[in-house]
Amino acid sequence: MCTSMERVYVHRDVAEPFIEALVEAAGTYALGDGHDAGTVLGPLVDRRQRDIVARHVADAVSRGATVRAGGVVPEGKGFFYPATVLTGVEESMLVMTEETFGPIAPVVVVSSFEEGLERASASRFGLAATVYTADPEHMAAARRIPAGVVWVNQWQGGGPERLYEPAGDSGMGATGSRAAYDAATRPTSIHTAPVA
């Protein structure tokens, strides 16, 4: 979905256990069409989208990133791509500068919360962001991320009244709450001249 994670910034103090857990979790995703028992990761929408995902991963690898899980287009029918974890990622790689829209987790290790906040804020995209922290000051600072919606210690939180407008090159206007109604309707003005 459009608010799924595209980039991960993780503090160096927790980076290794975080990456190990992420790699382990990625390995649990079986590929299939949804009819197989245990299938949790279906195909991408078409070959074009899978090619974009594969190209972004290949670009990262060719420029020094390490594939920790996945990273190979599977053989067989369907436009599948495995859950993939990349480390050693640089900000100039396609997985960081473009929207991949695939099961890719590019992980960047940062030395401070402020560095992670700055890097996340530097993206030209600003649909959604999620910050996980136990520090109240970091929770308050999360509002500085220029995104339409920022979740703290959750993902997809909020109710039907949630209204937000994406920032940067993301999205197409306000959504949620009354904006969802406005997007599904078309206003019409009728001007009638007085009858003589």
Image: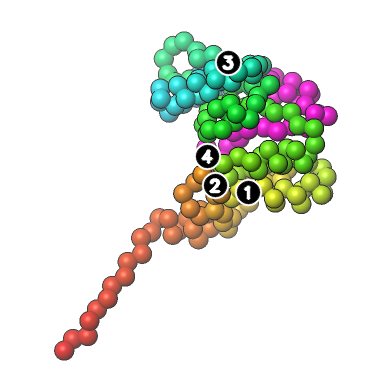
Q: Is residue 86 shown to the viewer in this render? A: yes
Q: Tell which tag, 4 or 1, sits nearer the viewer.
A: 1
Residues at marks 4 and 3, CA–CA distance in whole angstroms: 27 Å
Amino acid of disc 2: Gly
State yes or no: residue 24 in magenta: yes
Specify the color scheme: rainbow
Q: Which residue is mark 4?
A: 2
Discs 4, 3 touching: Cβ within 8 Å: no
Residue that mark 2 sits on: 168
Front tag of 3 and 1:
3
Residue depth check, mark 4 versus mark 3: number of the one nearer the observer? 3
Q: Earlier in the sequence, mark 4 or mark 1?
A: 4
Q: Earlier in the sequence, mark 3 or mark 2?
A: 3
Query: Residue 87, position in %: x, y?
Result: 68, 21
Residue hosting label 1: 146
Callout 2 crowding tier (Cα within 10 Å): few <14, some 14–19, many ≥20: some
Cβ–Cβ below 8 Å for labels 2 and 1?
A: yes
